Image: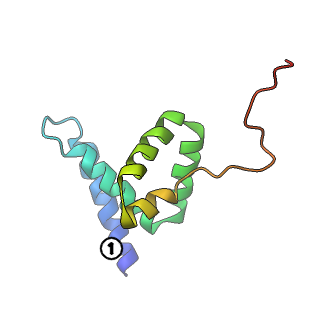
């Protein structure tokens, strides 16, 4: 029951955040941030979705890392769940031979 309440609250925050992001009153971005954190906290598939996006878009990864470094407690643990996982067999550098 509690999970559905948080999930519903996350969706409401995301919708109102999207509706108010272009207004001169700065409420859109904080609502989007709160909605995203609540959604990641309640949904594994949302955490996987954001993890994939962080792996593919380095600008998004840097922005979320910036938020993660400045947060504490439960919010820090929730955001840390979305860190991209590094695979052992995957090369992380370019070959200079061609």
The kind of secondary structure element at disc 1 is helix
Quadrant in which the N terminus is drawn? bottom left
Instruction: From the viewer's side, name the closer residue of 4 and 62.
Output: 62
Residue at 16%, 36% in the rendered image: 23
Extreme residue toward the bottom, this view: 1
The x, y position of residue 30, in whole percent, is: 25, 49
The x, y position of residue 31, in whole percent, is: 26, 51
Position of 98 relative to 65 (above/below): above
Extreme residue toward the top, this view: 98
Extreme residue toward the left, this view: 25
Please tell me how crowded label 1 is: few (under 14), some (14-19), or many (20+) other residues with Cα within 10 Å.
Answer: few
Position of 97 relative to 33 (above/below): above
The x, y position of residue 11, in whole percent, is: 33, 59
Quadrant in which the C terminus is drawn? top right
Residue at 23%, 44% in the rendered image: 28
Q: How is the image coloured?
A: rainbow
Q: For residue 9, what is the image quadrant? A: bottom left
Instruction: From the viewer's side, name the closer residue of 35 and 92.
Output: 92
Q: Is residue 92 left or right of residue 41?
A: right
The x, y position of residue 79, in whole percent, is: 45, 57
Determine which residue is flagged by label 1: 5
Residue at 38%, 62% in the rendered image: 75
Instruction: From the viewer's side, name the closer residue of 25 and 60.
Output: 60
Position of 3 relative to 72 (above/below): below
């Amino acid at each position: 029951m509690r999970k559905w309440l948080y999930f519903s609250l996350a969706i409401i925050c995301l919708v109102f955040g999207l509706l108010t992001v272009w207004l001169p009153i700065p409420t859109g971005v904080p609502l989007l941030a709160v909605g995203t954190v609540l959604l990641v906290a309640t949904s594994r598939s949302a955490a996987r979705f954001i993890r994939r996006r962080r792996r593919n878009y380095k600008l998004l990864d840097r922005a979320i890392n910036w938020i993660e470094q400045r947060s504490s407690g439960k919010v820090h643990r929730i955001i840390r769940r979305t860190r991209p996982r590094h695979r052992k067999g995957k090369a992380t550098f370019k070959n200079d031979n061609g």
